[in-house]
């Protein structure tokens, strides 16, 4: 591989804060349906916990 080829790959595959490159993320977005059921579950659970904390109850 030449330096030019390596540079072109690294320009496209920038790492995000979570360590995944943009190319990897784009590939998985095609394979994973959105909205993700895990995200739906986690956000609803988080909402229940926050509401329970504000009302002084238990989730």
Image: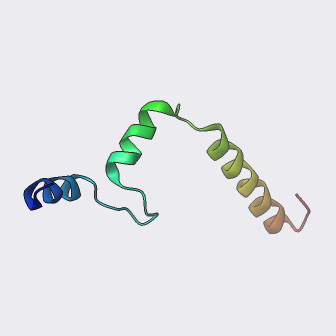
Determine whether, in the image, residue 37 is placed left or right of residue 14.
right
Q: Does residue 35 lie above or below 51 as drawn? A: above
Which residue is pictured at 71% across the width and 44% down the height? 41
Residue in front for this viewpoint, 21 or 29: 21
Q: Where is residue 35 in the image (x, y as percent from the top left)?
A: 55, 36
Q: Position of residue 37 (x, y in %)?
A: 65, 37
Determine whether, in the image, residue 22 is placed left or right of residue 39.
left
Rendered-image quadrant of the C terminus = bottom right
Q: How many labels does the image show?
A: 0
Residue in front for this viewpoint, 28 or 3: 3
Determine whether, in the image, residue 16 is placed left or right of residue 40.
left
Q: Position of residue 40 (x, y in %)?
A: 65, 42
Residue in front for this viewpoint, 35 or 2: 2
Determine whether, in the image, residue 45 is placed left or right of residue 57.
left
Q: Does residue 32 lie above or below 39 as drawn? A: above
Residue in front for this viewpoint, 17 or 6: 6
Which residue is pictured at 36% across the width and 41% down the height? 26
């Amino acid at each position: 591989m030449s330096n030019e080829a390596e540079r072109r790959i690294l320009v496209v595959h920038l790492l995000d804060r979570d360590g995944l490159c943009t190319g990897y993320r784009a590939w998985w977005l095609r394979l994973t349906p959105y909205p993700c059921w895990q995200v739906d579950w986690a956000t609803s659970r988080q909402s229940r916990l926050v509401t329970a904390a504000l009302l002084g109850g238990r989730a």
